[in-house]
Amino acid sequence: MKITPTNCCLFLAIAALSVSCTPNGNHDNPPAVQPAQQEIKITGAATPYPAMKVLATAYGANTNNSNITFLPSSQSASGIAGVKSGLADIGTLTRKLKSGENDGSLVYQELARDALVVATNPSVTGVTNLQTEDLKAIYSGAVTNWQDLGGPDATIVVLDRPEDESAKRLLRQHYLGKELKNSPEVVILRHEKELIATIQNTPHSIGAFSLAYAISNQLPVNRLRLNGVEPTSANVQSGKYPMVRTLALVWSPTLSDDTQKFLDFTFSETGAKHLLNSGFVPSSKN
């Protein structure tokens, strides 16, 4: 067929019609636009991180638009500073706010309680309960062999935390006392994760760390009774087991809708159930 200006226009019209009939050319139903993710940043003390990660995972499973970021952990003071400076949306603490820390720019609320369990490597057989005097003897170096406490003939490897960490403060408050001097043989580990990994890999070792972490991760360690009291969530709730640290959060009075929704979930009955199932004892204020 001879191409003429009239035929050319006809071809172009047919081609345009063909394009408009294809799915890609349908402009009547444009694809839905997903709302932008609002990042929720968390920082502060390391101890509450496992509890917050439990909540973040549960929240994210039912929320398509969640983006919760855990910044490098440090201590409670960094959580407070992070929220005040606007670098973080939520700060994690293992204590109450000190006088002067809250100038009206923070909202504080207790989240849960987490017991500190004293545990040994599975190689330590025959030792299931320690009295206060036993703990003092172990940490001071007065007793250095498990055989003296009913265990195997093996040197006790003591794993400890720095004096400014909540775990060591609790040990001193409830069992060791302020004046007891550490044995020079004690191994000091800066981070709780390091202590947990070391106690699992080091025969005849002993250390104190999060009971909730031990429960939720089913750690293969021997959890010891202290003065005859077993470290369980029930004993924490009843007050029978005293070595307990408070996990708390701070945030700004003015916060994003996404952060508010996550906090609403965190302090809801559903959030409390997730915490309890992971070994934490939700605050009665939740």
Image (cartoon, helix red, strand yellow):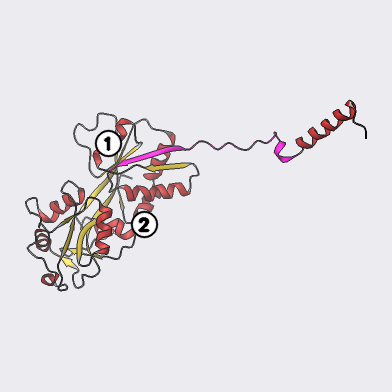
Q: Nearer the viewer, mark 2 or mark 1?
A: 1
Q: Quadrant of the N terminus?
A: top right
Q: Residue furthest top?
A: 5
Q: Residue furthest right?
A: 1
Residue 32 lies in the magenta stretch: yes
Would residue 8 be found to the left or right of residue 122 on screen? right
Range shown magenta? 22-45
**Residue 219 occupies quadrant:** bottom left
Would residue 248 be found to the left or right of residue 267 on screen? left
Residue 59: percent from the left, percent from the top?
43, 47
* Residue under pointer 1: 80
Residue 181: percent from the left, percent from the top?
7, 54
Q: CA distance from mark 2 to mark 1?
A: 28 Å
Residue 262: percent from the left, percent from the top?
41, 41
| Amino acid found under the numbered disc labelled 2 | Asn
Q: Is residue 278 above or below residue 121?
A: above
Would residue 86 be found to the left or right of residue 129 on screen? right
Q: Earlier in the sequence, mark 2 or mark 1?
A: 1
Q: Is residue 112 above or below residue 16?
A: below
Name the residue rendered at 28%, 38% in the picture: 79
